[in-house]
Amino acid sequence: MPIRIIIADDHAIVRSGLEMLVNMQDGMEVIETACDGEEVFQKAVQLKPDIVIMDLNMPPGENGLSATRRLKEAAPEIKVLVLTMHDDKEYIFRVLQAGASGYILKSAEDMDLINAIRTVQRGEAYLYPKAQKLLIEDYMNRISQDGSDDVFNLLSTREQEVLEYIAKGYTNKEIADMLYLSVKTIESHKSKIMEKLQLRTRPELVRYALKQGLLDFV
């Protein structure tokens, strides 16, 4: 039984190249491709692949971080391998927090990607070498700071998602439309976010989101 894979990337040439590479391997099959987060979410929920190879930035549609969170909530058995150009620890932390099983750069060698797919399929986590180093350094820094918890972790997955959209300047109505929720629900999430973070104004929320690296996903 081959490893069934869906590829999500906003560039058609990247999707085609990845599909060709993966389909050349023994025991792997690309069953679908998608151009943004919403499309890959719908196809993955319907087709139940083993792995989704997920880009992070897929404008103008839903980004890969948001899609990963939604997919892991709806179908936790599906593994997500993030394939991105972003070589930054804030991206790595957000991706792992969202539930991804692996993180690899688009600059990696072809066989590194194939190895990452097989590693994730075995139920193991895959991080490229520099990412492993960054995580170890961050862990050591947290220990040296008495292991204080980031208040960001007090927010639910949905609240973190709403915070990201608020910080990017979307109105409550626009956020409600994107998340298929009511404006009243978005307002409720916003109030809870403000309360948990002990913030009082939208500019304070934006500054907090910038500090957390959320505004990198534009």
Image (spheres, helix red, strand yellow):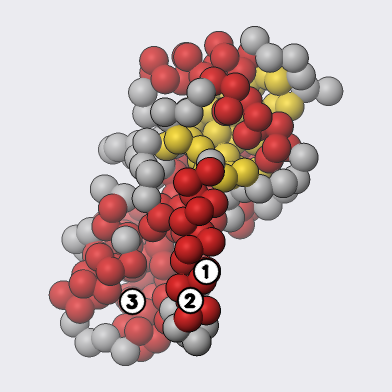
Q: In the image, which disc is placed on residue 190?
A: 3
Above or below residue 100? Residue 187 is: below
Task: Judge by depth and name the residue closer to the eye, 181 or 128.
Answer: 128
As helix, strand or loop, the secondary structure at mark 3 comes to helix
Neighbor class of circle 2 (other Cα within 10 Å; few <14, some 14-19, many 20+) is some
Above or below residue 10? Residue 45 is: below
Is residue 96 visible in the rendered structure shown here?
Answer: yes
Mark 2 touching mark 1, by CB under 8 A?
A: yes
The residue that mark 1 highlights is 139
Q: Quadrant of the N terminus?
A: top right
As helix, strand or loop, the secondary structure at mark 2 comes to helix
Q: Position of residue 189 (x, y in %)?
A: 39, 75
Task: Farthest residue to the right: give it.
Answer: 1
Cα distance in 3D space between marks 2 and 1 = 5 Å
The label nearer to you, 1 versus 3, is 1
Task: Farthest residue to the left: give it.
Answer: 203
Cα distance in 3D space between marks 3 and 2 = 28 Å
Amino acid beneath label 1: Tyr
Q: Position of residue 21 (x, y in %)?
A: 57, 14
Q: Position of residue 209 (x, y in %)?
A: 29, 68
In terms of sequence position, does the residue under pointer 3 or pointer 2 come before the other?
2
Q: In the image, which disc is placed on residue 142?
A: 2
Task: Judge by depth and name the residue closer to the eye, 2 or 89.
Answer: 89
Amino acid beneath label 2: Arg
